[in-house]
Amino acid sequence: VLTICYVGMIILGVVWLANINLIFLLISHVLALGIMWWRSQKVDLEDKRAIADFYQFIWKLFFLEYLIFPIACLL
């Protein structure tokens, strides 16, 4: 689901949002998506702490969106 959201934001940026810095938006979302995939591969599903850490990381990505989009609009 998160991958679909990131890909959707990339597509939306390219197709619809003309007043923003597309390069910044694309690079930031591809980078965030890549890091999310990398971190997800390292989660030990038997370790509750590892699961909680990854869950916290997902929330950090969510709040990072509040910085990425305004920066893309200002650049």
Image: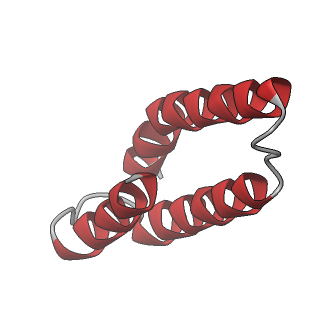
Location of residue 31 (image quadrant): bottom right
Q: Residue at x 59, y 36 (%)?
A: 58
**Going by the image, does 63 lie left or right of 20?**
right
Q: Residue furthest front?
A: 46
Residue 60, image x, y percentages: 63, 30
Tell me: residue 18, above or below residue 51: below
**Going by the image, does 65 lie left or right of 34?**
left
Q: Residue at x 58, y 38 (%)?
A: 61
Q: Residue furthest left?
A: 16
Looking at the picture, tell me which residue is in the foreground, 48 or 22.
Answer: 48
Looking at the picture, tell me which residue is in the foreground, 71 or 57.
Answer: 57
Location of residue 64 (image quadrant): top right
Looking at the picture, tell me which residue is in the foreground, 24 or 51.
Answer: 51
Colour logic = secondary structure
Tell me: residue 64, above or below residue 21: above
- How many labels were placed on the picture? 0
Q: Residue at x 25, y 59 (%)?
A: 19
Q: Residue at x 44, y 51 (%)?
A: 72
Location of residue 9 (image quadrant): bottom left
**Going by the image, does 39 lie left or right of 32?**
right
Looking at the picture, tell me which residue is in the foreground, 13 or 4.
Answer: 4
Residue 71, image x, y percentages: 49, 43
Quarter in which the N terminus is drawn: bottom left
